Amino acid sequence: MARKYNWKTGCDVEATLSVIGGRWKPILVCHLLAGPKRFGELRRLTPNATERMITLQLRELEGDGVLERHVFAEVPPRVEYELTEYGRTLEPILESMQAWGREFKARRAAEEAGSEPCEVAHAEA
C-alpha cells in the first residue's frame, strides 16, 4: 500500500478515510453489501471507474481486511469478492452516507427549481 497513514497518532476520521476514502471504495463496498460479486459484475456496476482503478481499490480493501478474494480452480478461472465480517461493520456508515446524499440531492434539486426543499407536514392532533 502506498498510503502514508500513521494509525498510532492520526485522527480517527483519518483512519476511516484511509480505509474507505476515495471515489470508488465506498461504492464497491456498497455493492458488496448485497453479496459476493465477480470482477465483471463490479465493473458493470461502476461503469465510470477503469478496470485498473477497480483492481487497485479492491486490493487495498483486501489488504485492510474489508473484503476477501476467492479464486476458484476452474477453467476459465473465476474470482469472487466478498465482504468479511469486519467489512460488514461499514454498513451503517454507508447507509448514513446514502441518506445524507439523498437529502443533499433533494436540496440541490429544490435550489435549482427555485424553491425550498419540501418538508413533510405532520397532522396536528
Image (cartoon, rainbow, N blue to C red):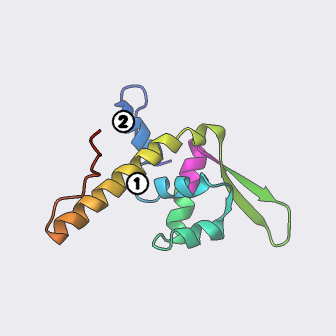
Residue 14 x, y percent position in the rendering: 36, 38
The residue wearing badge 1 is: 22
Residue 25: in magenta span:
no
Residue 50 x, y percent position in the rendering: 49, 71
33 in relation to 16, above or below:
below
Q: Which is the main secondary structure of the residues drawn in magenta?
A: helix
Seen at 50% across and 73% down, the residue is 47
Mark 2 neighbour density, 10 Å: few (under 14) some (14–19) many (20 or more): few
Seen at 27% across and 50% down, the residue is 121
Which of marks 2 and 1 precedes in the sequence? Answer: 2
The residue wearing badge 2 is: 13
Mark 1 neighbour density, 10 Å: few (under 14) some (14–19) many (20 or more): few
Residue 35 x, y percent position in the rendering: 67, 54
**Viewer-proximal residue, 110 or 33?**
110
Residue flagged by tag 1: what amino acid is it? Gly
Magenta span: 58-67
